[in-house]
Amino acid sequence: MTILVIAEHENGAVAPATLNTVAAAAKIGGDIHVLVSGQNVGGVAEAAAKIAGVAKVLVADNAAYAHQLPENVAPLVAELGKGYSHVLAPATSNGKNILPRVAALLDVDQISEIISVESADTFKRPIYAGNAIATVQSNAAVKVITVRSTGFDAVAAEGGSAAVEAVAAAHDAGKSAFVGEELAKSDRPELTAAKIVVSGGRGMQNGDNFKHLYALADKLGAAVGASRAAVDAGFVPNDMQVGQTGKIVAPQLYIAVGISGAIQHLAGMKDSKVIVAINKDEEAPIFQVADYGLVADLFEAIPELEKLV
Amino acid sequence: MKVLVAVKRVVDYNVKVRVKADNSGVDLANVKMSMNPFCEIAVEEAVRLKEKGVASEIVVVTVGPATAQEQLRTALALGADRAVLVESAEELTSLAVAKLLKAVVDKEQPQLVILGKQAIDSDNNQTGQMLAALSGFAQGTFASKVEVAGDKVNVTREIDGGLQTVALNLPAIVTTDLRLNEPRYASLPNIMKAKKKPLETVTPDALGVSTASTNKTLKVEAPAARSAGIKVKSVAELVEKLKNEAKVI
């Protein structure tokens, strides 16, 4: 059994979600190979070769893969994937974009967002916004799977010494082109990797009021997230959304501020170790999942909390 | 140009589902069913393209049981011109659905296919990408903006780091994210008119598609419940608990 893990990388570095995906591969068992595709990704491949437990790194360095366009990357992964028992990718926006296309090219069903490995062919995954957990078995020759990062503790980024091998295949479907991107710039930790997350909801009333959360987050070394309601209202950008269809987080501490606790939001954060809810409505459903609930006006409680931590 | 919109009948997003006692699935008896919210956004986007004069005809398709006609009629009331039901009582995987939709795409020859990015029941987030692969089309997933320009469509996508814009050759596949638009409500006259719009029913066999699956669901369980927490009376008490009891700050 040999498993191909699709590396996620950004700005020349291996993204943390790759390490959780390698951890899932290690649970399945067998040799682990990592595919790094992109342009000028030699540095990423070297970093990937150091990941604990990785036996080989395949590098597809080509302009066609520069922006991970699925029309170009999926045929590459499908071609390489044929020789593997499993193809795994992190369930990031990039992994979700590419992997189903790979599965269809291989004519197999995909298993999305696994949270545990029961055996080499059986996995658990949440359905219905995490209100049910399905155990799914695959008899596909190549098992194509996306991995929810919060389900697996990351393997060490250092300690391995895998061989690095170039892949010649260049697929340029010529059907799509990268036009541009607007990426959020922040000095705070990345939402899905942060140990502490402070999130705001509709109760924040406007985007400007998020400054109270940023101040608290900076004191705690935390990332800042938001509920769908806050994003839909235009308070903050989409990359901050935590929930069923946004980012899934499971930090040590999650502080929900002015968030009522819709099912869709809970789906994105209920695996956090400790949950704090601050809301002036004592009937808010968020209190049903909170370890510590504080019924208070957030505009008084947050500045006070910032002073005391 | 012709736009094809694929929709799915799912448990209404307000319903809190319960797992069946025998762990065979979730209990769907007497539960309110609706069009998947992301599919409503897909229908709305197609209707807006038609209102702008970009789309000439909107065909809505679903793969599902006979009762999924309700969701097709909803789409017709919102502005779709005609509907296709690929009738299957079985619960199909995303790949099987994508294969059935591919057969409909071959027949209808749309320039643009719009789908929701994921269904809120299976949470798979696969069908649009799979249909793109099978059709050999480009894909713009998780779209927050769609602009057709000549023989291309520019799609702004919601990605983990922010927004990305890609230019896709037509025909292309678009899957919708939440911020693409706010779906309208169907008016009563339009609901009445929708009853007279054409709705064709086909079967997977007639389309010549095998819906065999490589996946099998062994069981469905309720998630582990969080134990009930406590209410603290003040910010000071909260900080004390976080420091000394939970030890997380």
Image: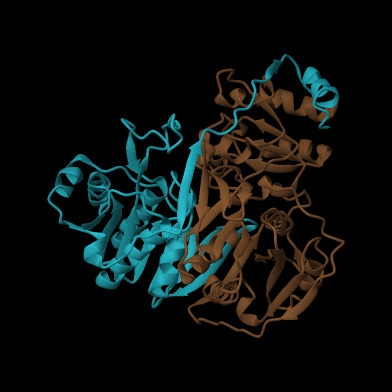
Chain colours: A brown, B cyan
- State the residue at coordinates (69%, 20%): A294
Q: How many numbered circles are shown?
A: 0
Q: Quadrant of residue A16?
A: bottom right
Q: Is residue A22 visible?
A: yes
User: On the picture, is A276 further left or further right than A47?
Assistant: left
**In this view, A234 is above or below B138:** above
Q: Is residue B52 visible?
A: no
Q: Does A231 sit left or right of B100 as displayed? A: right
What is the x, y in percent for residue A221? 82, 42
Task: Please name whichever residue, A294 or A114, is drawn nearer the observer in this view of the structure.
Answer: A114
Residue A18, position in %: x, y? 71, 59
Q: Quadrant of the N terminus of chain B?
A: bottom left
The image quarter containing residue B45 is bottom left
Is B228 drawn above or below residue A245 in the view shown?
above
Instruction: Specify whether B230 is left or right of B61.
Output: right
Q: Residue drawn at (15%, 43%), measured in percent from left and top?
A: B192
Q: Nearer the viewer, residue A269 or B204?
A: B204
Q: Compare residues A256 and A50 and report the one nearer the observer.
A: A50
Residue at left 33%, top 38%?
B33
Quarter of the figure with the C terminus of chain B: top right
- Point out residue B26 in the picture as x, y percentages from the top left corner: 42, 36
Picture quadrant where residue B200 is located = bottom left
Q: Quick check: A31 left or right of A118? A: right
Q: Position of residue B146 (x, y in %)?
A: 44, 63
Q: Residue furthest left?
A: B196
- What's the residue at 79%, 61% (across, down)? A53
Most distant residue in the top direction: B233
